[in-house]
Amino acid sequence: MRFGVALPALIAAALLASPSTFAAGTAAGTVIDNTAQANFDLGGSNFTQDSNTVSVTVAERIDVLVTLLSSQVQVNAGDSTRSLLFSVTNSGNGSEAWQLAIDSGLGGDDFDPVPANPSIYFDTDGSGDYNTGDTAYVPGSNDPVLAADESVNMLLVNEIPADALDGELGHSELSAVAATGSGNPGDVFAGLGDGGVDAVIGATGGSATEFGEYVVADVQMNVIKSVVVADPSGGNSPVPGATLTYSITVEVTSTGTATDAQFNDVIPGFTTFVPSSIELNGSALSDAADTDAGELNTAGTPAVVVRLGDLTQASGTQTVNFQVTID
């Protein structure tokens, strides 16, 4: 007595499923056993007949996602070591090493950023930006090895050409390719998966790319915040009931105009805003959303909002003050 088993076809379909919906899936090397049974009556007695057991070992699916984590990065012409943050995620179902590369000579932008040397770094300190303590990526030496569904954050570091103009865009791309191999979905690398199982290329082809964007902006600002504490006893201890006077200075430090500049500061937790305490350059502003430049915005988490208008170096330092009390 024979029983047809459709598991191989099901496994193949699962291996080629989109990683965005399937995630890592069943681990490579997992053995799936299946035994069928037939029940029948004979001479008034019930009998059970087992089929042979069919075993399928799950192959390794090779898939990867590269995701841009940085928003558009504002730079100046001639800047050095400006970074873009990406994540590389192993969306396959086995452990895999990934070979990384940078390409800053893409079409469709206004200028080509110049890759630093080295140009790819692990975000070692988790800051999301390049720092001297970040570890440089060396191809073939410290390729990131990621378990199924594991991610690592990487930085692309570029120099900005001195002749880049205000408003121009420059793109830089990170690519990740499986060390085992890449190709068309369904391609098989026999015996090269985890534990010696076959490795099968998934929907991403075993490679992925994503680019980030620099924009040249000739406006740079200094924003500095300070606080003065006044407690109910006339001292400066931050006890319940003490008043915190926040002072924030905003100053354009480069050429160009910061158009429609606006100051926003969320009221900190465990404090209460002091009514009528908002000032701009020493002049009181109302808490209401009216014709003056400031307000306490209570839509959602309360925040002080002050509209500073168009600012240049000639505008000088803009100073915003407001107060809260410690609950």
Image (cartoon, grey):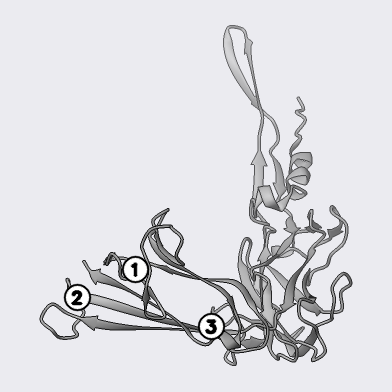
Distance (Cα) linking label 2 and label 1? 14 Å
Tag 2 secondary structure: loop
Residue 297: where, in percent of width, then height?
41, 59
Would you identify the image quadrant in which residue 142 lies? bottom right
Residue 155 in sight here: no
Q: Is residue 151 placed above or below 24 in the rendered structure?
A: below
The residue type indicated by label 3 comes to Asp
Residue 116: where, in percent of width, then height?
75, 90
Q: Which residue is mark 2?
A: 242
Residue 280: where, in percent of width, then height?
41, 76
Distance (Cα) linking label 2 and label 3? 36 Å
Q: Nearer the viewer, mark 2 or mark 3?
A: 2
| Residue situated in front as seen by the camera: 308 or 223 | 308
Tag 3 secondary structure: loop
Circle 2 residues within 10 Å: few <14, some 14–19, many ≥20: many
Q: Nearer the viewer, mark 1 or mark 3?
A: 1
Looking at the rendered image, the quarter that the C terminus falls into is: bottom left
Residue 306 in sight here: yes
Q: Which residue is mark 1?
A: 268
Q: Is residue 279 placed above or below 1 in the rendered structure?
A: below
The residue at the point 74 percent across, 60 percent down is: 63
* Side of 45 where 100 appears, left or right: right
Q: Earlier in the sequence, mark 2 or mark 3?
A: 3
| Residue situated in front as seen by the camera: 302 or 250 | 250
The residue type indicated by label 1 comes to Pro
Q: Which residue is mark 3?
A: 125
The residue at the point 73 percent across, 90 percent down is: 118
Q: Earlier in the sequence, mark 2 or mark 1?
A: 2
